[in-house]
């Protein structure tokens, strides 16, 4: 499976002033560095949780899709009424139902078995919205905690100290659907 993302929103997934307050930094000398840390932390949250924080177009290519009628979309959240495009071996396929949410999925009509495609391409929008204010508070906090870890880890540290914020790990696991 190949997954690619194209950002739709150009906004930052965090508020720089709030991020600086979290890090306990009043100076403006490091704004560019703090902003880079915020973007890096947001990307880490997205990758770990398999989500889109802000609106993105996601393209998924599945080779040899097998016999399942249920296809879990790898990046969420997806709105219930979102417009999906599904192509099977280059031909449009419209007999499906979208089940939206953080862990969205597509249920294909049984006519899928008659087609037995070699490749399925799915394109869809994902994300919580177009601005940082649309991101759930727990994810916003995870971005800030991870950014603070990056800020505090600017000096030489051993590999065990600079990994990820425990808060980010917990929150990302919950959005990813990991269960213990």
Image (spheres, rainbow, N blue to C red):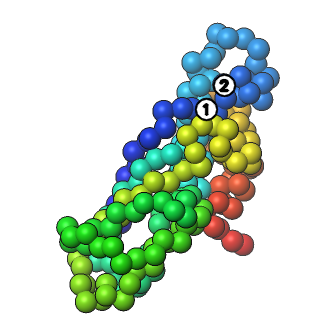
Label 1, on which residue? 38
Rate crowding at label 1 as few (under 14), some (14 to 19) or many (20 or more) other CA atoms within 10 Å: many
Residue at the farthest front position: 81
User: Against 125, is 145 above or below?
Assistant: above
Name the residue at 45% across, 54% down. Answer: 125
Q: Quadrant of residue 133?
A: top right
**Position of 12 relative to 124 (above/below):** above
Image height check: is 64 above or below 67? above
Q: Would you say residue 81 is visible in this rendering?
A: yes
Secondary structure at badge 2 equals helix
Badge 2 or badge 1: first in the primary sequence? 2
When asked about the image quadrant of residue 114, the answer is bottom left
Q: Quadrant of residue 44?
A: top right
Q: Residue at x 55, y 54 (%)?
A: 51
Query: How far across and how far down the image is residue 41, in percent?
Result: 60, 39
Q: Residue at x 74, y 48 (%)?
A: 138
Q: Is residue 79 left or right of residue 114?
A: right
Tell me the residue that label 2 is attached to: 16
Residue at image coords 24%, 79%: 117
Q: How many marks?
A: 2
- Is residue 77 positioned above or below 153 on the image? below
Pointers 2 and 1 in contact (CB under 8 A)?
yes
Quadrant containing the C terminus in the rendered view? bottom right
Depth check, front residue: 125 or 16: 125
What kind of element bears circle 1? helix
Q: Which mark is residue 78?
A: none
Residue in the foreground of this view, choosing between 82 and 17: 82
């Amino acid at each position: 499976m190949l997954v690619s993302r194209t950002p739709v929103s150009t906004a930052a997934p965090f508020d720089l002033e709030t991020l600086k307050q979290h890090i306990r930094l009043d100076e403006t000398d490091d704004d560019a560095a703090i902003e880079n840390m915020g973007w890096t932390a947001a990307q880490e949250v997205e990758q770990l949780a398999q989500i889109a924080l802000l609106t993105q177009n996601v393209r998924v290519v599945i080779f040899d899709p097998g016999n399942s009628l249920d296809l879990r979309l790898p990046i969420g959240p997806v709105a219930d009424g979102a417009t999906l495009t599904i192509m099977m071996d280059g031909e449009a396929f419209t007999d499906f139902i979208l089940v939206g949410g953080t862990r969205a999925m597509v249920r294909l009509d049984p006519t899928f078995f008659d087609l037995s495609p070699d490749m399925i391409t799915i394109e869809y929008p994902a994300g919580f919205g177009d601005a940082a204010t649309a991101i759930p508070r727990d994810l916003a906090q995870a971005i800030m905690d991870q950014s603070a870890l990056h800020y505090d880890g600017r000096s030489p540290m051993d590999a065990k100290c600079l990994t990820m914020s425990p808060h980010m790990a917990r929150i990302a696991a919950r959005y990813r659907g990991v269960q213990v």
